[in-house]
Image (cartoon, helix red, strand yellow):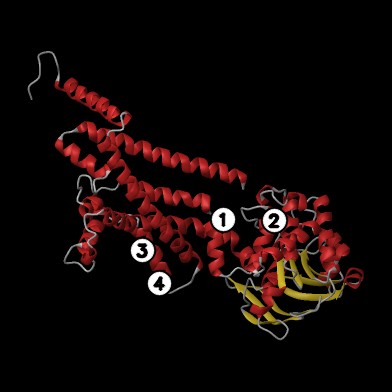
Amino acid sequence: MNAVALPLQLSGVVWEAGGQRRLDGIDLSIEAGARTIVLGPNGAGKSLLLRLCHGLLQPSAGKIAWRGSAGAEAAGHQAMVFQRPIMLRRSVAANVGYALNLRGLNGHDRRARTAAALTSTGLSHLAAQPARALSVGEQQRLALARAWAIEPEILWLDEPTASLDPAATFAVEGIIEAMHRAGCKIVMTTHDLVQARRLADEIVFLHHGRLLERQPADRFFANPATAEGAAFVAGTLSW
Amino acid sequence: MMVAPGISPRSTSMQQIYDAFATALRLIVTLDPGLVEIVRLSLEVSLSAVGLAAIIGLPLGGAVVLFAFPGRRALVVLLNSLMGLPPVIVGLVVYLLLSRAGPFGVLGLLFSPAAMILAQTILVTPIVAALARQFLEDLWSEYADQLHSLGAHRGQALLTLLWEGRFSLTTAVLAGFGRASAEVGAVMIVGGNIEHATRTMTTAIALETSKGDLSLALGLGLLLMLLSLAINGAAYLIRDLAGRRL
């Protein structure tokens, strides 16, 4: 997939709420290619960072800029999967079709893309089932199918396996891998070190709303550059 | 009041009520033409008004949730306040608008079912809109991020919310129907309670009671309650069955 919207450039991004600075001076460039895992303890600002990048929140200060265009145009090149995705009160296939309909796809293309996305995520046999009747793991796969169908250039994943059992986690990670192989940039938050080791090409490490490290994954886990990073890898970092 | 020896005024009064009930049941069971005509017109007026109120009120309630505009909070307060709009005031205003000297007098709608539908629509729309807004606000807080993420603009999000909340929104519509079907003041003023033309169940009940003909009043009252029960029951069943499927 050719990069159209990436890289995404964050310059001095700040986000405040209730008088508290929850993200502080984030400078980050997100390029196509490598799987980026945003690591950090609870409350570090991982989800906030993804929501800002995805455009669900606006920064209190600083700038978020897509390549050569405004964010509105870039919105068509990205998708996001939440920890608890919302399933619409309609069938599995209709949930995927809804996302495609918003992108202006006509009936034939919509059906073809829906079928392909459901096949890729192993949900074809559930296409006619009500989406809300699926298990949590199946719903997360459907959320990925909905994202995959729109063929995003970048996929934001906010702790997508946090509430899943190991089998469902394995299935979801498989789909994420497949999307990455298909050329989709993956940016995912987690506080699960084992999962991060499995999936990450590079690590963005946050603590108390500040970006402390950005490293290739093997280097981060072998030799963190900051004391906080080392403590997090060792499992001794306090909030 | 003169009563036979050994019979108390209370037992005579109870006998009147029993007789009235018996006559009322006979009118219902035999499908008395006068009764059927009144029931049919009442349903036409109330269902039309509720349909129009739903068409206006549901999107209005959703728009108040999704769109930011000056005076939004004032509109919320206004809608909530208008839920308790006095029917006689609405009747009076519609009367003035539709009377021969009024701005819409040329339409010749006064003392017609159309005038009654208009009055009831004005009464019911704020109820539907205010209840819809309350429900859709909760739904929006749940759906907002997901719909934004999928790329839905405000108009698309509004349609989606209305569809997603369709089973719960029936409660708002039913509340509107309850108001419309029980309403008497406005339809009396703008309809005139004209026999074979604008007489509804509620206006007929008021008239027959004042005339002392309790049989027809009771029969209509029973039917009004049964119809309300049937419509609410049907809506509940549909919502329950459909909700289980989805």
Residue density around tag 3, few if under 14, some if 14–19, many if 20 or more, within 10 Å? few
Give the alpha-carbon distance from disc 4 to disc 1, as whole Å. 27 Å
The residues bearing labels 1 and 3 have C-alpha atoms spaced at a distance of 26 Å
The chain letter for the residue carrying disc 4 is B
Please, which chain is the residue tagged with disc 3 on? B
- Residue B243, given in percent of the width and then of the height, sits at 57, 46
Q: Which mark is residue B71?
A: 4
> In the figure, is residue B134 to the left or right of B124?
right
Q: Are marks 4 and 3 in contact (CB under 8 Å)?
A: no
On the same chain: label 1 and label 2? no
Residue holding disc 1: B164
Residue A110: percent from the left, percent from the top? 69, 64
Disc 4 from disc 3: Cα separation: 10 Å
Q: Residue at x 26, y 25 (%)?
A: B22
Image point (59%, 60%), residue name: B143
Q: Chain of mark 2?
A: A
Q: CA distance from mark 2 to mark 3?
A: 41 Å
